[in-house]
Image (cartoon, rainbow, N blue to C red):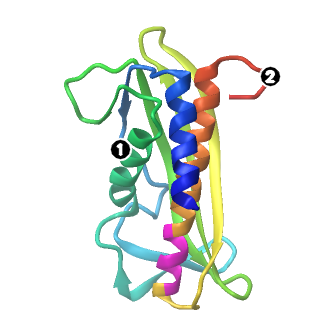
Amino acid sequence: MREETDRQVVSAAASAGMHGVLVVAVPQAAPGFDQPRIAYLRRPSEVSYYANHVWADSPSRMVMPLLIRSLETSGLWRAVVPMPSGIRGDYQLDLSGLVVQQEFLQQPSRSRVQVRVQLVEVKAQRVLGARNFEALEPAPADDAYGGVLAADRAVATVLATMNEWIASCLRGPTGESC
């Protein structure tokens, strides 16, 4: 079923036409989240880290290849190029304030992924739109591994929603806020 949905999104994007080259900046993490330690909350606004569990790299570096692949398969772009690059793009995508954390504020625990995204038309030096994205996914277990599984699903949700938003921004003013 997921494969069918992906094909429909790609087909719709392809029929809308490709929009040139997109240059993607490395996502910038929110303060306290630019490290490989897995963050969690037991109380609001009090970030803690697992003592014996870490990401393979910082979440922002781990999200980058997923982001690039998601944008490439959207069918919106002739090419998607990660920064740094000598290639000049037609558009630039900036991500900031990336947070990936497991929250034990209710049962079961949930993983939250949030990020602010800005799409810029490079030649016109014009911001087409900026938006905050957030996804919460329940963890299958109240431990680090359960949090990681939930974070994977939350990242996938954010990327899918972000691609839909980018497509709407590229369609131009349709009454939707971009």
Amino acid type at mark 2: Gly
Spatial CA distance of label 1 from label 2 is 30 Å
Left or right: where 62 falls relative to 177: left
Quadrant where the image shows the N terminus: bottom right
Left or right: where 90 falls relative to 173: left
Q: Residues within 10 Å of mark 1 (few under 14, many from 20)?
A: some
Residue 173 to residue 84: above or below = above
Most distant residue in the left direction: 86
Residue 48 visible here: no
Residue 45 pos. (x, y %): 65, 70
Q: Which residues are magenta?
A: 146-152
Q: Residues within 10 Å of mark 2 (few under 14, many from 20)?
A: few
Magenta highlight on residue 29? no
Q: Mark 1, mark 2: which one is toward the viewer?
A: 2
Most distant residue in the top direction: 124
Of 139 and 102, nearer the camera is 139
Q: Which residue is mark 1?
A: 26
Q: Residue at x 36, y 38 (%)?
A: 25
Quadrant in the rendering for residue 114: bottom right
Q: Residue at x 59, y 58 (%)?
A: 157
Quadrant in the rendering for residue 104: bottom right
Q: Magenta segment, principal secondary structure?
A: helix
Residue 3 to residue 20: above or below = below
Amino acid type at mark 1: Val
Q: Which residue is mark 2?
A: 175
Quadrant in the rendering for residue 135: bottom right
What SS does tag 1 mark?
loop
Quadrant where the image shows the C terminus: top right
